[in-house]
Image (cartoon, grey):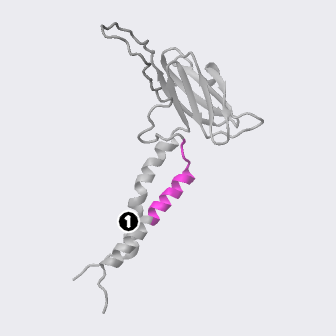
Amino acid sequence: MRKSISPLRSVLALSATAALPVALAAPAAAVSGISVSTTGSSVSVVTSACTRINGSWGTAALLTSSQASFAQGRQVALSGTTVSQSAAWSGVSPGTYTVVVVCSSGSTAGSQAVIVSAGSAPTLSTTSRPLPTRPVPVQPAPARGVNGGLGGTVRDYGPLTLGIGAALVGAGAVTAAWCLRRRSKPTRP
Protein backbone atom coordinates (compact mmCIF):
# COMPACT_ATOMS: atom_id res chain seq x y z
CA MET A 1 0.00 0.00 0.00
CA ARG A 2 1.32 3.40 -0.95
CA LYS A 3 1.47 6.01 1.78
CA SER A 4 0.80 9.50 0.49
CA ILE A 5 1.93 12.75 2.03
CA SER A 6 -0.48 15.61 1.93
CA PRO A 7 0.62 18.40 -0.43
CA LEU A 8 0.21 20.97 2.34
CA ARG A 9 2.70 19.11 4.55
CA SER A 10 5.26 18.93 1.73
CA VAL A 11 4.83 22.62 0.92
CA LEU A 12 5.26 23.58 4.59
CA ALA A 13 8.34 21.38 4.95
CA LEU A 14 9.94 22.76 1.79
CA SER A 15 9.15 26.35 2.77
CA ALA A 16 10.64 25.86 6.23
CA THR A 17 13.74 24.25 4.73
CA ALA A 18 14.18 27.08 2.24
CA ALA A 19 13.65 29.80 4.84
CA LEU A 20 16.02 28.27 7.41
CA PRO A 21 19.28 29.67 5.92
CA VAL A 22 17.73 33.13 5.64
CA ALA A 23 16.46 32.99 9.22
CA LEU A 24 19.87 31.91 10.49
CA ALA A 25 21.63 34.69 8.57
CA ALA A 26 19.22 37.46 9.65
CA PRO A 27 20.48 37.91 13.22
CA ALA A 28 24.08 38.18 12.04
CA ALA A 29 23.21 40.94 9.58
CA ALA A 30 21.17 42.84 12.15
CA VAL A 31 23.89 42.82 14.82
CA SER A 32 25.59 45.98 13.62
CA GLY A 33 24.49 48.58 11.13
CA ILE A 34 28.04 49.77 10.52
CA SER A 35 31.10 48.60 8.61
CA VAL A 36 34.53 49.55 9.94
CA SER A 37 37.81 49.27 8.04
CA THR A 38 41.43 50.23 8.62
CA THR A 39 44.20 51.18 6.23
CA GLY A 40 47.53 51.91 7.86
CA SER A 41 46.87 54.47 10.60
CA SER A 42 43.43 55.45 9.23
CA VAL A 43 40.09 54.12 10.45
CA SER A 44 36.85 54.61 8.52
CA VAL A 45 33.23 53.70 9.19
CA VAL A 46 30.31 53.40 6.76
CA THR A 47 26.62 53.04 7.58
CA SER A 48 23.27 53.41 5.87
CA ALA A 49 21.20 53.46 9.05
CA CYS A 50 21.02 57.22 9.68
CA THR A 51 18.61 59.81 8.32
CA ARG A 52 19.35 63.49 7.92
CA ILE A 53 17.76 65.69 10.60
CA ASN A 54 18.38 69.46 10.64
CA GLY A 55 21.26 69.08 8.17
CA SER A 56 23.10 66.46 10.25
CA TRP A 57 23.45 62.71 9.69
CA GLY A 58 24.93 62.02 13.11
CA THR A 59 28.29 61.53 14.77
CA ALA A 60 30.84 58.72 14.98
CA ALA A 61 33.29 58.30 17.85
CA LEU A 62 36.55 56.37 18.08
CA LEU A 63 37.02 55.11 21.65
CA THR A 64 40.18 53.65 23.16
CA SER A 65 39.96 50.77 25.63
CA SER A 66 40.25 53.23 28.55
CA GLN A 67 37.34 55.41 27.38
CA ALA A 68 33.91 54.40 28.62
CA SER A 69 31.47 56.81 26.98
CA PHE A 70 30.73 58.19 23.55
CA ALA A 71 31.56 61.74 24.70
CA GLN A 72 35.15 60.75 25.62
CA GLY A 73 36.03 59.45 22.14
CA ARG A 74 37.41 61.24 19.06
CA GLN A 75 34.19 62.44 17.47
CA VAL A 76 33.66 63.07 13.75
CA ALA A 77 30.45 64.20 12.05
CA LEU A 78 29.00 61.78 9.49
CA SER A 79 28.89 62.92 5.88
CA GLY A 80 27.28 61.31 2.86
CA THR A 81 23.99 60.69 1.13
CA THR A 82 20.72 58.89 1.87
CA VAL A 83 22.34 55.67 0.64
CA SER A 84 25.57 55.78 2.67
CA GLN A 85 27.08 57.89 5.44
CA SER A 86 30.72 57.75 6.49
CA ALA A 87 33.35 59.15 8.82
CA ALA A 88 37.13 58.71 9.04
CA TRP A 89 39.99 59.27 11.46
CA SER A 90 43.63 59.60 10.42
CA GLY A 91 46.83 59.36 12.45
CA VAL A 92 45.43 56.66 14.73
CA SER A 93 48.12 54.99 16.81
CA PRO A 94 48.27 51.18 16.97
CA GLY A 95 45.88 49.54 19.42
CA THR A 96 42.36 48.26 19.94
CA TYR A 97 39.49 50.71 19.49
CA THR A 98 35.72 50.73 19.45
CA VAL A 99 33.85 52.68 16.79
CA VAL A 100 30.35 53.87 17.77
CA VAL A 101 27.92 55.62 15.41
CA VAL A 102 25.03 57.64 16.81
CA CYS A 103 22.50 59.01 14.30
CA SER A 104 21.12 62.54 14.57
CA SER A 105 17.84 61.03 15.83
CA GLY A 106 19.73 59.82 18.92
CA SER A 107 19.60 56.12 18.01
CA THR A 108 22.80 54.08 17.88
CA ALA A 109 23.47 52.70 14.39
CA GLY A 110 26.01 50.24 15.80
CA SER A 111 29.34 49.72 17.43
CA GLN A 112 32.27 47.57 16.37
CA ALA A 113 35.74 46.82 17.70
CA VAL A 114 38.71 47.38 15.42
CA ILE A 115 42.43 46.72 15.74
CA VAL A 116 44.89 49.18 14.22
CA SER A 117 48.22 47.51 13.50
CA ALA A 118 51.59 49.18 13.44
CA GLY A 119 52.48 49.81 9.80
CA SER A 120 55.76 48.31 8.76
CA ALA A 121 58.06 50.43 6.65
CA PRO A 122 59.35 48.75 3.52
CA THR A 123 62.91 47.54 3.79
CA LEU A 124 65.42 48.05 1.00
CA SER A 125 68.07 45.53 0.19
CA THR A 126 71.01 45.81 -2.14
CA THR A 127 71.47 43.34 -4.95
CA SER A 128 74.20 42.74 -7.46
CA ARG A 129 71.88 42.74 -10.47
CA PRO A 130 71.17 45.97 -12.35
CA LEU A 131 68.00 47.90 -11.66
CA PRO A 132 65.27 47.73 -14.31
CA THR A 133 65.26 50.54 -16.86
CA ARG A 134 61.53 51.09 -16.61
CA PRO A 135 59.53 51.40 -13.39
CA VAL A 136 57.64 48.35 -12.22
CA PRO A 137 53.96 49.19 -11.61
CA VAL A 138 52.79 48.67 -8.05
CA GLN A 139 49.17 47.67 -7.53
CA PRO A 140 47.45 49.61 -4.72
CA ALA A 141 45.99 47.59 -1.88
CA PRO A 142 42.19 47.44 -1.72
CA ALA A 143 40.88 50.19 0.54
CA ARG A 144 38.22 48.06 2.24
CA GLY A 145 39.87 44.65 2.22
CA VAL A 146 38.08 41.45 1.33
CA ASN A 147 34.35 41.50 1.97
CA GLY A 148 33.80 37.75 2.08
CA GLY A 149 31.88 35.53 4.43
CA LEU A 150 28.78 36.18 6.46
CA GLY A 151 27.92 39.87 6.58
CA GLY A 152 30.66 40.73 4.11
CA THR A 153 28.58 43.11 2.03
CA VAL A 154 29.21 46.79 1.75
CA ARG A 155 25.70 47.49 3.02
CA ASP A 156 23.66 45.73 5.71
CA TYR A 157 20.19 44.83 4.53
CA GLY A 158 17.18 45.26 6.76
CA PRO A 159 14.47 42.79 7.75
CA LEU A 160 12.21 43.84 4.86
CA THR A 161 14.82 42.92 2.25
CA LEU A 162 15.60 39.64 4.02
CA GLY A 163 11.88 38.86 4.26
CA ILE A 164 11.36 39.47 0.54
CA GLY A 165 14.36 37.27 -0.20
CA ALA A 166 12.98 34.51 2.04
CA ALA A 167 9.60 34.78 0.29
CA LEU A 168 11.26 34.44 -3.12
CA VAL A 169 13.28 31.42 -1.98
CA GLY A 170 10.12 29.88 -0.51
CA ALA A 171 8.14 30.51 -3.71
CA GLY A 172 10.91 28.88 -5.73
CA ALA A 173 10.94 25.85 -3.43
CA VAL A 174 7.16 25.50 -3.62
CA THR A 175 7.24 25.76 -7.42
CA ALA A 176 10.02 23.18 -7.66
CA ALA A 177 8.14 20.79 -5.35
CA TRP A 178 4.95 21.24 -7.35
CA CYS A 179 6.74 20.53 -10.65
CA LEU A 180 8.48 17.45 -9.25
CA ARG A 181 5.24 16.19 -7.75
CA ARG A 182 3.44 16.55 -11.10
CA ARG A 183 6.24 14.69 -12.89
CA SER A 184 6.10 11.77 -10.46
CA LYS A 185 2.41 11.06 -11.06
CA PRO A 186 1.67 8.53 -13.79
CA THR A 187 -0.11 9.91 -16.82
CA ARG A 188 -3.62 8.66 -17.38
CA PRO A 189 -4.49 7.21 -20.79
Left or right position of 116 against 178 = right
Q: Is residue 156 above or below residue 139?
A: below
Residue 161 appears at what percent x and percent y?
A: 55, 53
Q: Is residue 112 above or below residue 117?
A: below
Q: Secondary structure at mark 1?
A: helix
Residue 127 appears at what percent x and percent y?
A: 32, 8
Numbered label tally: 1
The C terminus - image quarter: bottom left
Report the span colored magenta: 155-171
Q: Which residue is mark 1?
A: 13
The N terminus - image quarter: bottom left
Work out which residue is located at the far front of the displayed protein and give it. Answer: 133
Q: Amino acid at mark 1?
A: Ala
Looking at this view, is 31 or 135 the one in front?
135
Q: Label 1: few (<14), some or many (≥20) within 10 Å?
A: some
Q: Is residue 10 above or below residue 31?
A: below
Q: Is residue 134 above or below residue 49?
A: above
Looking at this view, is 172 or 158 the one in front?
172
Look at the image and say whether residue 182 sits in the magenta stretch. no
Left or right position of 105 against 153 = right
Work out which residue is located at the far right of the displayed protein and give it. Answer: 54
Residue 97 appears at what percent x and percent y?
A: 51, 22
Work out which residue is located at the far bottom of the displayed protein and give it. Answer: 189
- The dominant secondary structure in magenta is helix
Q: Residue at x 54, y 46 (%)?
A: 157
Looking at this view, is 67 or 164 the one in front?
164
Residue 10, by quadrant, is bottom left
Look at the image and say whether residue 167 sits in the magenta stretch. yes
Q: Residue at x 43, y 58 (%)?
A: 19
Residue 158 appears at what percent x and percent y?
A: 56, 48
Q: Residue at x 29, y 84 (%)?
A: 186
